[in-house]
């Protein structure tokens, strides 16, 4: 009886640990990110006027995943369309934005050739390689190559979130470059982080502390929060938690008009068109869907916005 009792209490301890999960990374948090809290009214007042940013999106790598990853196949729309868990071709993007005074910034990091050449050395162990379908990754343009083509130095990296396919370019990012994330992105705990935490830690090793955007409630209640990143209305970070706890989308006023980078709040074209959020690896599907709907409503109010999705054109 007594042995049983000890066994029960021990196993419930392990269960509590398992249920609590762990943070995405143990990398330190630094001072708050640049920018000031804004509002959807302020952002939407400016959206239709051309801005000062030059923006280029690179297809860093081609990849494919079972469709149940990038799309929630359990949604009625997906069931009705007869979508099954087939292999879905996707891309890994990196966006380079140039601000006339503040310099060059990346949104996410693409894929470093170093990670492709020796994933184990960069912390991507065999298990992550397997569950991350590394055998399906094909490099088009490595992060270093993209940075070499850039005019001037890199002033910072804005992350849509910290899943490994968004930080695989970190080995090519100089250690002194500031890194910006949504609040709670790196600290919220989830069971889903257990396998990837080691790799995230190693990819971030030696890099600057993560600087978080502390979003304030949007006075118009269209979004969970909006930051005016350069305090000049040229780039807005939009809080869209759901896919991860600190997911961020970006509205960028380029010289050619407004561009929305959805991040993985919407990964596939089918998902965007049919309002279905990503599936596996999403921490809160309902919240993800709600924020996807808010982004679609923004685009409906401003149809000139060009939408660039998480992993498909
Ligand atoms: Zn992704």
Image (tube, helix red, strand yellow):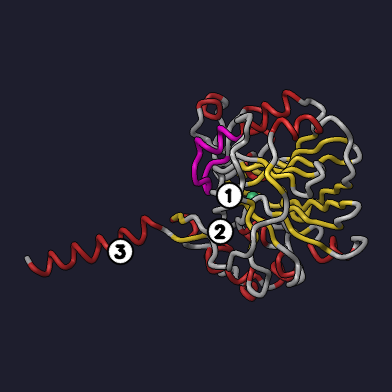
The quadrant of the picture occupied by the C terminus is top right
Does dot 1 land on a helix, a strand or a loop? loop
Q: Earlier in the sequence, mark 1 or mark 2?
A: 2
User: In the image, is residue 43 part of the stretch drawn in magenta?
Assistant: no
Kindly identify the residue that appears in the image at 8 percent across and 68 percent down: 2
The quadrant of the picture occupied by the N terminus is bottom left
User: In the image, is residue 282 part of the stretch drawn in magenta?
Assistant: yes
Up/down of 299 relative to 99, above or below: above
Q: Label for residue 186?
A: 2
Up/down of 27 relative to 278, above or below: below
Report x, y in % for residue 244.
55, 48
Between disc 3 and disc 2, the foreground one is: 2
Instruction: Return the residue nearer the eye: 72 or 302.
Output: 302
Q: Label for residue 14?
A: 3
Up/down of 81 relative to 308, above or below: above
Instruction: Return the residue nearer the eye: 242 or 209.
Output: 209
Where does the magenta region start and end? 278-291
Kindly identify the residue that appears in the image at 78 percent across and 25 percent down: 303
Spatial CA span between label 1 and label 3: 27 Å
Quadrant position of residue 301: top right
Up/down of 200 relative to 212, above or below: below
Instruction: Return the residue nearer the eye: 39 or 178.
Output: 39
Q: Which residue is mark 1?
A: 246
- Mark 3, residues whose alpha carbon is within 10 Å: few (<14), some, or many (≥20)? few
Quadrant position of residue 47: top right
Spatial CA span between label 1 and label 2: 8 Å
Kindly identify the residue that appears in the image at 73 percent across and 72 percent down: 175
Report x, y in % for residue 10.
23, 66
Does dot 3 land on a helix, a strand or a loop? helix
Report x, y in % for residue 78.
55, 29
């Amino acid at each position: 009886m007594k042995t049983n009792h000890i066994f029960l209490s021990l196993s419930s301890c392990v269960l509590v640990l398992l249920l609590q999960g762990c943070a995405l990374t143990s990398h330190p948090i630094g001072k708050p990110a640049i920018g000031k809290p804004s509002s959807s009214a302020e952002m939407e007042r400016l959206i239709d006027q051309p801005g000062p940013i030059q923006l280029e999106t690179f297809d860093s790598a081609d990849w494919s995943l079972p469709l149940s990853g990038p799309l929630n196949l359990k949604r009625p729309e997906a069931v009705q369309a007869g979508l099954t868990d087939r292999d879905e071709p996707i891309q890994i993007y990196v966006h380079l934005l140039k601000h006339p005074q503040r310099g060059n910034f990346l949104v996410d990091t693409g894929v470093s050739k170093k990670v492709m050449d020796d994933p184990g050395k960069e912390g991507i162990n065999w298990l992550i390689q397997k569950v991350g379908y590394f055998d399906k990754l094909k490099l088009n343009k490595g992060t270093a190559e993209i940075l070499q083509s850039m005019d001037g130095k890199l002033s910072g990296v804005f992350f849509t979130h910290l899943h490994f396919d968004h930080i695989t370019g970190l080995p090519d990012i100089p250690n002194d470059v500031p890194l910006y994330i949504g609040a709670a992105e790196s600290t919220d705990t989830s069971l889903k982080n257990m396998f990837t935490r080691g790799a995230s830690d190693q990819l971030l090793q030696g890099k600057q502390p993560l600087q978080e955007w502390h979003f304030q409630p949007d006075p118009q209640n269209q979004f969970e929060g909006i930051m005016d990143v350069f305090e000049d209305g040229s780039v807005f970070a939009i809080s869209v938690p759901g896919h991860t706890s600190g997911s961020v989308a970006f509205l960028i006023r380029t010289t050619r008009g407004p561009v929305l980078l959805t991040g993985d709040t919407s990964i596939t074209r089918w998902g965007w068109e049919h309002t279905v959020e990503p599936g596996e690896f999403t921490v809160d599907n309902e919240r993800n869907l709600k924020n996807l709907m808010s982004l679609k409503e923004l685009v409906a109010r401003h149809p000139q916005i060009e939408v660039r999705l998480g992993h498909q054109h």
